[in-house]
Amino acid sequence: MKGDLFSSDHMVQPADRPGMSVQNAKSIRYAVNGEMLARQGAMVAYRGNLQFERKGQGVGGMLKRAVTGEGLPLMVVRGQGEAWFAHEAQNCFIVEVEQGDEFTVNGRNVLCFDASLSYRIQTVKGAGIAGGGLFNSVFTGFGHLGLMCEGNPLVIPVSPQQPVFVDTDAVVGWTARLQTSLHRSQSIGSMLRGGSGEAVQLKLEGEGYVVVRPSEVTPQKEH
């Protein structure tokens, strides 16, 4: 069989190491030897001896998800083999979380992660129910986190001298030691006259990085 489809650009080669790697711009490959976690329904192919099980959240987790709306439905992948993960042809990236660090990320952008990582769902500080009810997943431990994003994300440095303001519908995540609060950039009078469509942003202060997607999430595109 010949043709561009069967060129080395698309042909999968055996994994050269365990764990996750970027297969191409739209998918992540995970060489499983034990256990890992992934978004439910994100597996597009696998080979080897693997089992896929829905991860229960427990009563507390189910209630928290119902209240927060934070969508992070997970499955556990066990065994030995290779699996490929993707979601709606979104671009894929890998973040290495180091011991003692943490990375806050919107659940809709999580694709897969090492079992050595733990996560919790928490309210974004300064942006509680009164401010729109923002909730994210905070990852800690040591390991790799596979993320997805529509388009190529913007990674913006944050410094004590220069805080960054991001649209709450566009933010993907941010690093530890950043403080968050809601910032209103539009006066009440302007809002009553129809507004600019950019009334409230998430303000990040401190030192670190914030990741932003190149488009806002609409209700029809929430995952």
Image (spheres, rainbow, N blue to C red):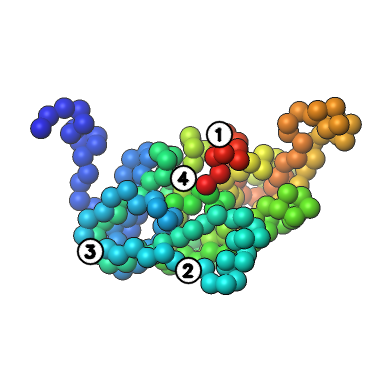
- Name the N-terminal-most of marks 3 and 1: 3
- Name the N-terminal-most of marks 2 and 1: 2
Q: CA distance from mark 1 to mark 4?
A: 12 Å
Under tag 3, what secondary structure?
strand
Find disc 3 in the rendering and name its residue: 49
Type of amino acid at the residue the image marks with label 3? Asn
Is label 4 in contact with label 3 (beta carbons under 8 Å)?
Answer: no
Q: CA distance from mark 3 to mark 1?
A: 38 Å
Q: Residues within 10 Å of mark 3 (few under 14, many from 20)?
A: few
Q: Nearer the observer, disc 3 or disc 1?
A: 3
Q: CA distance from mark 3 to mark 2?
A: 22 Å
Is label 4 in contact with label 2 (beta carbons under 8 Å)?
Answer: no
Residue 27: give x, y in percent of width and height: 36, 44
- Disc ID at residue 56: 2
Q: CA distance from mark 4 to mark 2?
A: 23 Å
Query: Could you say which quadrant of the image residue 164 lies in?
Result: top right
- Disc ID at residue 214: 1
Above or below: residue 97 compared with residue 211:
below
Type of amino acid at the residue the image marks with label 4? Met
Residue 18: give x, y in percent of width and height: 29, 59
The quadrant of the picture occupied by the N terminus is: top left
| Apparent side of residue 25 relative to residue 203 in the rendered image (left or right) | left
Under tag 4, what secondary structure?
strand
Q: Nearer the viewer, residue 43 or 25?
A: 43
Find disc 4 in the rendering and name its residue: 148
Q: Give me the residue at 85% from left, 27% from top.
A: 193
Q: Nearer the observer, disc 4 or disc 2?
A: 2
Q: CA distance from mark 4 to mark 3?
A: 26 Å
Q: Give me the residue at 61% from left, 43% from top.
A: 171
- Name the N-terminal-most of marks 1 and 4: 4
- Name the N-terminal-most of marks 4 and 2: 2
